[in-house]
Image (cartoon, rainbow, N blue to C red):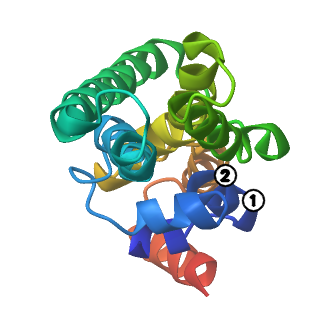
Amino acid sequence: MQRVEHLAPHERDTLLGTSLSRRFSKLPLWLSHPANIGAFYALLVSLALLLPYAFGATNNEVWGVEWVFHASLLIVACAFTGFLSVMLIAFSKRHPIAPPRYILYPMPFIGLAMLTIDRTELIGLPAVLIWMLLLLPGPVYVHLSWAPRWRLLCMVEDGKDPFGGVVEQEEKSEAEEMVGEDTELLEVIDAFESE
């Protein structure tokens, strides 16, 4: 975070993002890996599924086994999409994109409501639509926003400038060209730039 503070304000905003990404960026990099964030999203969705599974009309005596099986599948699937996002971002090297929150944020709640209606057999709803609404927001957020941010944070952790640092290098090279090999004058210029 000390290295992040030295960045320009717009670069810091790109690197840290909004409130959710800022919370994830405070975690250690190994813990905030996109696969772990995807698995965490799947765990939250799985916890929300407890009541529809427990009080559903069908297979009520084995709902716990069914829930554990589906929760495990969800966690593995979302973790895998997180790994896939890391690989795709490593090749594309694109910067984070703000996901469409007004579309993504209500989707899990709509999916949970639809799953509850389906499990209580009030109305039969297509399972593909329900699971898409429940699961799509997490991987989309990870792929568009968090995986690129995590890559940039890894670069900062390695001491690299994720935004190029071209301006600073050009200024230094111009200063070095003007003063030549005079180290005392270079120290004065560095002191002046740090102030």
Residue 81, image x and y in percent?
A: 39, 21
Q: Nearer the viewer, residue 170 or 50?
A: 50
Q: Residues within 10 Å of mark 2 (few under 14, many from 20)?
A: some
Q: Secondary structure at mark 2?
A: helix
Q: CA distance from mark 2 to mark 1?
A: 6 Å
Residue 131 versus residue 144 in the image, above or below: above
Q: What's under tag 2, amino acid-wise?
A: Thr
Q: Nearer the viewer, mark 2 or mark 1?
A: 2
160 left or right of 164 in image: left
Tell me which corner region of the image, top left, top right, bottom left or bottom right, holds residue 71: top left
Q: Which mark is residue 14?
A: 2
Return the x and y of residue 170 as percentages of the image width and height.
Answer: 64, 44
Of residues 84 and 102, the one drawn nearer to the viewer in this rendering:
102
Q: Which numbered tag is attached to residue 10? A: 1
The percent coordinates of residue 167 (x first, y second) are 67, 47
Residue 7 in the figure: left or right of residue 31: right
Q: Position of residue 92 (x, y in %)?
A: 53, 14
- Of the 4 image quadrants, the one containing the N terminus is bottom left
In the image, residue 172 sits, relative to residue 78, either above or below, namely below
